[in-house]
Image (tube, grey):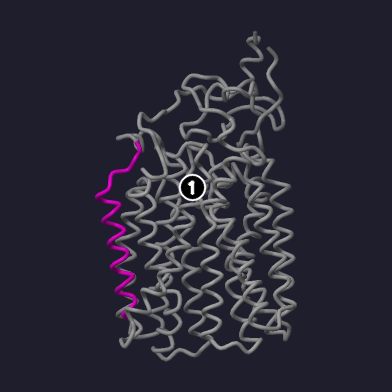
Amino acid sequence: MRSSNESAAAVRDLPAAAGSPPHMIAGNPGSLATFEARPLQVSSRQVSLVGLAPAVFLPALIFETGMGALAPIVALSGRALGASVSAAGLTLALLGVGQILGDVPAGALAARVGDRKAMLVAAAVAAVTLVGCAEARALWQLALAITATGATNAVFTLARQSYLTEVIPAGLRARALSTLGGMSRVGAFIGPFIGAAVVYGRPVRDVYWLAVACAMAAGLVVLLVRDVSEPGRAQERRSAPVSVRAVVARHHRVFLTLGTAVFLVGSVRATRQTVLPLWAEHLGQAPSTTSIVFGIAGLVDTLTFYPSGMVMDRAGRLWIAVPSMLVLGLTQALLPLTHGLVSLTVVAMLMGFGNGIGSGILMTLGADVAPPETRSQFLGVWRLCADSGSAGGPLVVSAAAGLGSLASGIVLMGGVGVLAAAALMRWVPRYSPFATKGSGSRGSVVAGSAEPPGTGMAYEELPGGCGRPGPPAQR
């Protein structure tokens, strides 16, 4: 039998989100610590990926299809308003800038009004900003509307991620979040084709009306389709709002360590979309040929998201995170060695595979380490780390190209991919309880149990308030 002192050092209960790491309220780093006793929230409904499709995956797919349709058109609409080539490219970059600016406020908004209402607000505001894009008659008007649209995308995406993290069982977490990430990939893949059909023989700004329709349709789905969580559960989990600054201060070690790895991952992923068309142009490939190569790589990317989530759930996060970064980094480093269409296509497909198997890995890691009581605020800062990397990576390549060596910039970012893999290996086991062990293998959480069934483990405090298995409790 366990002594009273040992019992006090063990986990009293798990957080409301099944499988989330427990969070300390007292104790010293590296030691066993006591946790707040609170009733486990267990939904009476069985949650499955199929059951989540109408409420979660469908609105995400519709919204991201609209965003995907914009990608090849934004720069062209800037040119139609008289912008130079460089200014038009900067206008496209503002979509990402808006997302960065919206990440932290998105977390604060979702924490204050709830995930569902935050999505409705994002869809409504997106419809307005996209109308602004369609009606813009000056470049500055388009730039402002594009930036605001990027911010609404941040709110919509974070709200679904936060909601899904709460309601999905730990054993399905990676598959669910990989599927959510896959919806973004599918939308980015099919959106340009739908947009091309809309603007065929018509002004390019008409694609913004397609995006308006997608935003409104996504909002209607969120409004009309019932969420899978219990009525009133969102009200139970929200208490007095906690400022983002307080969340950053409390979990600063997570953001400085694992957050750095997230930054590197984001930079390598975003660079892939930049280096492939630039190197294809360097090889003298026609724009139409480059588009086909890019589409083939995108197809490979899209087809691999669900199997990667299954591996993460069954074997652990690092079994996907590290290979994804190694494949993506090494294939980027190999890109300057290609000299023809065949070799370019093969490397592009390998890059798509490396990026595709990593679908949802950052969202899954964020769900693993996010504290339930301040989840939305935490995930807002978490996404800021990733999106900042996404903005910074292509700048490195652009700077290298400006100095006259595109190949060196590509190879440098390939090295960053290897560095990202090393950072993940170093820090993921420190913070995620599912780094090298599948989340489904820890057993089902039973209400009132003092520890995850079958583990016989207490939990140690981790910097930033996260938990990991500690030494087996003495019996």
Is 121 situated left or right of 425 in this image?
left
Q: How many marks?
A: 1
Q: Main secondary structure of the magenta part?
A: helix
Where residue 364 sits: x, y (%)? 55, 47
Where residue 342 sits: x, y (%)? 65, 79
- Quarter of the image with the N terminus is top right
Is 230 situated left or right of 369 in this image?
left
Q: Amino acid at mark 1?
A: Gln
Query: Which residue is tagged 1?
Result: 377
Is 318 situated left or right of 59 in this image?
right
Is 243 situated left or right of 313 in this image?
left
- Quarter of the image with the C terminus is top right
Rate crowding at label 1 as few (under 14), some (14 to 19) or many (20 or more) other CA atoms within 10 Å.
Answer: many
What residue span does the magenta drawing correspond to? 206-229
Nearer-the-camera pick, 342 or 120: 342
Q: What residue is rendered at 35% in x and 56% in y?
A: 59
Residue 143, by quadrant, is bottom left
> Is residue 104 shown above or below 376?
below
Q: What residue is rendered at 51% in x and 28% in y?
A: 444
> Is residue 86 shown above or below 110?
below
Where residue 362 sits: x, y (%)? 57, 52
